[in-house]
Amino acid sequence: MIDVTKIRKDFPILKREVNGKPLVYLDNAATSQTPQQVIDVIVDYYQNYNANIHRGVHALSQEATDKYEVARQTIQKHFNAKESYEIIFTSGTTHSINIVANGFTTLLEKGDEILVSAMEHHSNIVPWQMLAERTGAVLKVIPMNLDGELRMDVYDDLLSNKTKLVFCNHISNALGTINPIKEIIDKAHAVGAAVLIDGAQAAPHIKADMQKLDVDFYTASAHKICGPTGVGMLYGKEEWLNKLPPYQGGGEMIAEVTFEKTTYADLPHKFEAGTPNICGGIAFGAALDYMNSIGFEAIAEYEHELLEYATKELLKIEGLKIYGTAKNKTSVISFNIEGLHPYDIGSILDKLGVAVRTGHHCAQPIMDFYKIPGTVRASFSFYNTMDEVDVLVAAVIRAKGMLE
Ligand SMILES: Cc1ncc(COP(=O)(O)O)c(C=O)c1O
């Protein structure tokens, strides 16, 4: 069970006011807040052992290197990767996806097919479109139904021996749908295709097991899991990471450099050119430790209660429509009120201290599918309360009254 009163004390920001009202932070799908335990790790780094890693013989450098590599092992353990070098530190999911999309440039041929789901974030669309342009591969879309669930029957039809890659999010940021990724992975493997799962939205809610999923690539961003911005990870199966060429050249990623020829470092360094976000990587590990100390089962259970209660209460508002009504969904509610622009609702909610996101949520194809300009999105975390759901609902009713 979650002790939300106790947990909230870990998050200093939750005590603040916005526009003279207590902050109700419901923009967790965009970025989560940071507990004191993680803030302390960041401060400790800069106060006590700030140094560049992997190349110094001095004590500070060795300390920073050790902590950075321990963080990698924490991430490995959390995601149950077979080897720690299958975890590549990146600046976030966007960077992780670009590493893979760039790498496949040499592995695809004209006419090869790559499949994308209809409910992707732009960062899991655009890099693949760029890959298709470079290689002549064909991008095909797995459609969804009105509830925001993937049409797995069409997926079956789209798969063929031409399919080389499938990429899909684990959870949709705009709709909250939890996709059947195990089935997606197994079916892709049956035709010999590799699979990348964008785990940016799943990582805060679900502990994904790389070996059980048998996924080829999986991504996450620390800032959505109580960690800092500008750091994330790419998990890749060893054999795939060895096949892909490096994404960036520079220091740290080489074995030997001469003007005639350069050889590359082993995994994971081959993909980690330049000085990384050292403090961020260490704090990423601390953020996972924090979330595991609460427990992902307890988190999922509590967030589901928040989702059910908020859904029930919001639907009592006349003219309110929820987009994303999949059977299997997480604590994200995208909605509109008939005749009102989401931006106007969001602006009034902000005046009332309620932070939500409005717009297309970097998922314009989803908005086009529903023929809407955008939605208001309230996304809940384990530190939100039922009382905050009540504040949200009252604020939406007030906004509706003011705008109508
Ligand atoms: C599903 C999904 N994929 C990718 C991203 C991009 O993550 P980042 O901006 O951390 O690279 C996001 C961010 O909102 C997301 O929700």
Image: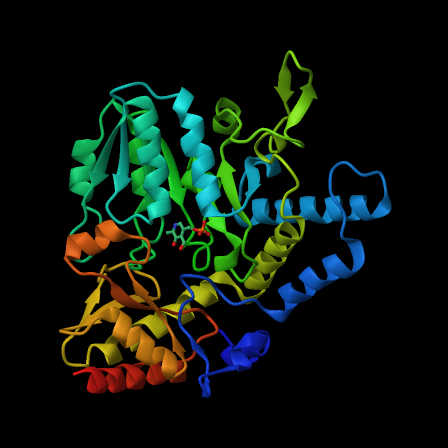
Is residue 396 shown above or below 122?
Answer: below
Q: In which quadrant of the rendered image does the C terminus lie?
A: bottom left
For the point 40% across and 62% down, which residue is it? Answer: 29
Colour scheme shown: rainbow
Q: Nearer the viewer, residue 258 or 396?
A: 258
Horizontal side of 197 relative to 345 (left or right) equals right
Can residue 116 be seen? Answer: yes
Task: Give coordinates of residue 380: x percent, y percent.
Answer: 39, 70
Horizontal side of 352 relative to 286 (left or right) equals left
Q: Nearer the viewer, residue 235 or 378?
A: 378
For the point 22% across and 30% down, which residue is it? Answer: 159
- When asked about the image quadrant of residue 114, the answer is top left
For the point 63% across and 63% down, which residue is it? Answer: 38
Is residue 60 shown above or below 269?
Answer: below
Spot the residue most to the top.
Answer: 260
Q: How many marks?
A: 0
Can residue 149 be seen? Answer: no
Task: Give coordinates of residue 76: x percent, y percent.
Answer: 57, 44
Task: Give coordinates of residue 74: x percent, y percent.
Answer: 62, 49
Task: Give coordinates of residue 402: x percent, y percent.
Answer: 22, 86
Horizontal side of 373 relative to 232 (left or right) equals left
Q: Nearer the viewer, residue 268 or 343?
A: 343
